[in-house]
Amino acid sequence: MKIKIGMSQTDITPPARVLLQGQVYTRISETVESPLTAQVFAVQSADAVLVLCACDVASVSRAFCDRVRELVRQRCPDLAPESIVISATHTHTGPVFWRTVNPHFLASKYLPPQAAFSEDITIPEDVWQVDRCFPYLAEKASGAICAAWEGRRPAAVSPAFGRAVTGHCRRAVYDDGSAQMYGRTDTVNFRELEGGNDSGIELLYIFTEDQKPLGVLVNVACPSQCVESKHFISSDFWGKARDRIKARLGDDFIVVGLCSAAGDQSPRDLVRRSLTHRRRTDPDMYGLEGASELGARIAGVVLDKLPAAQAAPPADSGILKHQVMTVDFPLRRVTLAERDAARQKLADYIAQSGKQTFDARDMAALRLYSGILERFEEQQQRMFFTAEIHVARLGDIAFATNPFELFLDFGNQIRAQSEAAQTFLIQLACDAGRYLPTEKAERGSHYSAYVFSGYTGHEGGDLLVRKTVDTIRQQFITQNDEGARS
């Protein structure tokens, strides 16, 4: 069956200053360093459809996805809304657009009435907040999706694979078994990084019928967080990669950036980073130099692999299947003993501090205890975190989504067991499921593995792996394929 493909790219940068999503303190953008974009890939074969919309934001909520799909349904009634996947590149220099404040600053009912946060969080009137950013981004994203859908035409795809170091494990493990996100490694107590990294880059090039390059899907196991603490709007290393690629291939060439399983990854090499010694290592991965470096690495792979992909006969037909599942992931629970300990530690911290006004560091510590108490109450009301999972097959390629900041080990398990010749993993898709840590990370604890850092724990990760691998297997081992595979 012949395939039709449409691609689009749209600037989604709000035309005003915004609150920036991420970090543990309030940031307001001062300028636009690089535009935020939404990039869309839409493929159709007969009645089967898959639409991937990647946005330069930290995360997307289920309500945002529902709104985008509703707008698409109104404008493009022939496009089934459930075929649309909306994901985030996880830049921390994009707008707060679906929740009112950073959860670290939520006034917890477990804190004493007199407790206050010392940071001045008065927001100037000219700063766009959720009430303006949410509809603006939904309008832009839905417009990009419709543009890709309406522009679909006979096309062909050519898969490729490359390597470039982008992400590193950001959790350091010590001799007592504890772990810390961005923990120091220049100490005799450091033992190992908790997990590995993935230098593989999955590529899928798209061509017109006459083999003109239209765009590429790029799947990288690293969140775009080089400039995560800055006070400007930025698409981080994805913007730098796109700029380099477009300089060679033209502005119409579309780069769809897809973040793979990278919940425990970051652009920073903790082993070569030192607070006390000068080390010869990467450019500053907390700044634009680092974003440019990673952008150059990704662009180099895309440009290097293009000639071979173009020379190979691109496939203009093939099997397309797309399955959407609703999965109930077990809510990670707090025991009675953990609740009581958190309650006591919260009281002790407040009493020992002697404070009534707390700064960002205090609030992060207080959140550790109040988050446990909040989860204890939440688990009395519900047992599961319900999520939407997509699994699709295009030829010999598989696509699998999840809403989490998924630790790399789970992604490796899916890829290793997948029946596909190549598996694209897309995290932070269709909802904000927060972190999904491994059992080892839960034992080591710290941020990203705390009970309140995510909705589900390693049991949920195991369930995700089983469901995803089994669905891929069912899509690849069909009655029509059995003869070819035997």
Image (cartoon, helix red, strand yellow):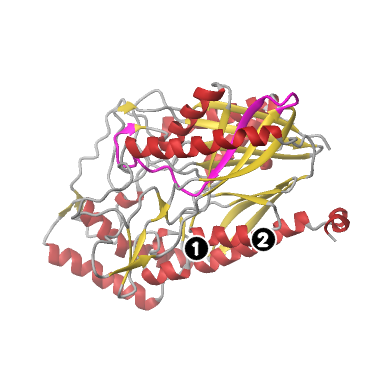
Residue 146, visible in the rendered structure: no
Horizontal and vertical percent for residue 274? 24, 54
Main SS of the magenta part reads loop
Q: In which quarter of the image is the C terminus?
A: bottom right
C-beta proximity under 8 Å, tags 1 and 2: no
Q: Quadrant of the N terminus?
A: top right
Assign a secondary structure to mark 2.
helix
336 is higher (above) or lower (below) than 210: below
- The answer to whether 361 appears left or right of 332 in the picture is left
- The answer to whether 9 appears left or right of 90 in the picture is right
Residue labelled with disc 2: 469
Horizontal and vertical percent for residue 189? 26, 70
Horizontal and vertical percent for residue 431? 53, 48
Residue 470, visible in the rendered structure: yes
Give the residue at x 46% y 63%.
437
Give the residue at x 43% y 57%.
264
Horizontal and vertical percent for residue 37? 49, 30
Give the residue at x 42% y 42%.
224
- The answer to whether 323 appears left or right of 39 in the picture is right
Give the residue at x 30% y 54%.
272
User: Residue 456's mark?
Assistant: 1
In depth, the one of 227 and 378 nearer the eye is 227
Magenta segment boundaries in residue numbering: 208-232
How many discs appear?
Answer: 2
State how far apart marks 1 and 2 are (Cα).
Answer: 19 Å
Q: Is residue 60 magenta?
A: no
Q: Residue furthest left?
A: 354
Residue type pointed to by label 1: Thr
